Image (cartoon, rainbow, N blue to C red):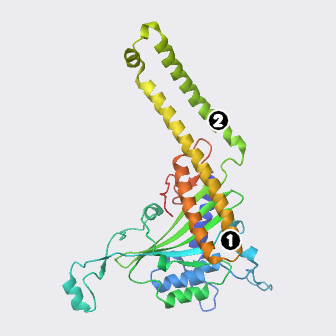
Amino acid sequence: MIGNTHSLERAIRWDIEENANFAVNSVGTFAHKNLYDVNSFADFYSWFRLGFAAIYMPQSSSVSEGSSLSTAALSAREKQVYRDVKRKLGPVKLSQQTAKATACDNFDLLQAIDNTTTSDSCSELGKDFTIQPTDFDVGFLDFIEDSNKTRWFSFLDDPSDKITQLERSNWLSAQTDHWKISMVLYNPDFDILTLTDIHFLLARSGRIWKQITLMSLKMRPYANLWLLCWEILFFLSILSILAEEVHQIITGLMSERERRCVRFFLKYIRVWTLIDWASIIIAFTLLGLWVHTVQERHALQVSLQTLLITCNSGNQAQCQGYQDDVVRMATAAGSLAEQTTLVSSGTLRFGAPDTLGFRGPSQW
């Protein structure tokens, strides 16, 4: 499971970093910049229009260089496919968080520079990283979405006009603190759902930090029922420990030499006895939580099916609402699953492409 998740997430990250390019030359044959060259609002709109939209929301087919073939408009089914094997679920979400206004440390000087400012014209600090933040750093940041600024982009439609409208309306401003692009992908070969966020953080120093976070979830951990064998063997061993401990207690209490319960328990309680009971309690607690997260994943799958039916019907308002519900449910299920992973069912991966240990928070 870990290997499949690594492969899937690296492919998504690689495509965004390497193929979503902008700053195209005059003949349109080469683009010089990628995601990490977005250093202004204008750069972001250029990258979104020429880079991201080109790889995630293409409207026509691609042909090889020098080919005599002509491009053709893509069908709705073809537009749903991403990187040949993945499926896009629902629209792309563009959201932002605004910076909290705070009193300026030196308002007198600021007012001398610009007399239109007020005492709370400064913004609260908090995201001024001194080095490139990792996805671990970005994953644990609070994100308070400004719902009035949220925009949706269907992968079925050309987003160029909407992006132009965003730029014209100054969707990004000095008050913007953090904005991100979110999408949901499903890989049927691995049966893995992946939530992807492309983050842009405007530090008060003026620098825009960029980072990608991914969270993946196996939808049916027991599609192969043989995987249950490991869980069964594990809990049989726990049950044998429980049976042995219960037998010792009953035998000791029934012994004529051990009629006094206090004396028996003083003899019974030892370091390894406590370790056995701790193992039993933790194992059955994990079992209960694991059953709960499997049920959550079933509910998530039902919600995904509802999302697809709603989006295909053309009801965009309900489609967007279901998209938010799916993201919330997937994040909650993934976070709980990571904490309750059993012997054979690795479920969640949320971290850098070259590290294995990071598991993410319950926010996406």
Report the residue at 49% width, 57% height from top: 360
Location of mark 1 (residue): 310
> Is residue 39 depicted above or below 337 in this figure?
below
- The residue under label 2 is which amino acid type? Ile
Image location (x, y in percent) of residue 132: 42, 68
Q: Is residue 360 above or below residue 15?
A: above
Nearest to the observer: residue 177 or residue 13:
177
Residue 116 percent coordinates (x, y): 28, 92
Tag 2 residue = 232
Please state which of residues 354 and 16 is positioned toward the viewer in this rendering.
16
Q: Residues within 10 Å of mark 1 (few under 14, many from 20)?
A: some
- Left or right: 221, with 205 as reference point: right
Q: Is residue 14 visible?
A: no
Counting labels gives 2
Outermost residue toward the top in this view: 256
Q: Position of residue 103 (x, y in %)?
A: 25, 78
Which circle's residue, 1 or 2, is located before the other in the chain? 2
Helix, strand or loop under label 1: helix
Residue at position x 54%, y 21% from top?
244
Q: Give the alpha-carbon distance from disc 1 to disc 2, as whole Å.
A: 39 Å
Identify the image quadrant of residue 159: bottom right
Residue drawn at (43%, 61%) of the image: 140
Q: Residues within 10 Å of mark 2 (few under 14, many from 20)?
A: few
**Local SS, label 2:** helix
Q: Residue furthest right?
A: 68
Residue 138 shows in this picture: yes
Contact flag, marks 1 and 2 (Cβ < 8 Å): no
Q: How far across and how far down the image is residue 155, in percent?
A: 65, 77
| Residue at 68%, 61% in the rendered image | 187
The amino acid at mark 1 is Thr
Q: Nearer the viewer, residue 334 or 68?
A: 334
Location of residue 46 with respect to 256 vertically, above or below? below
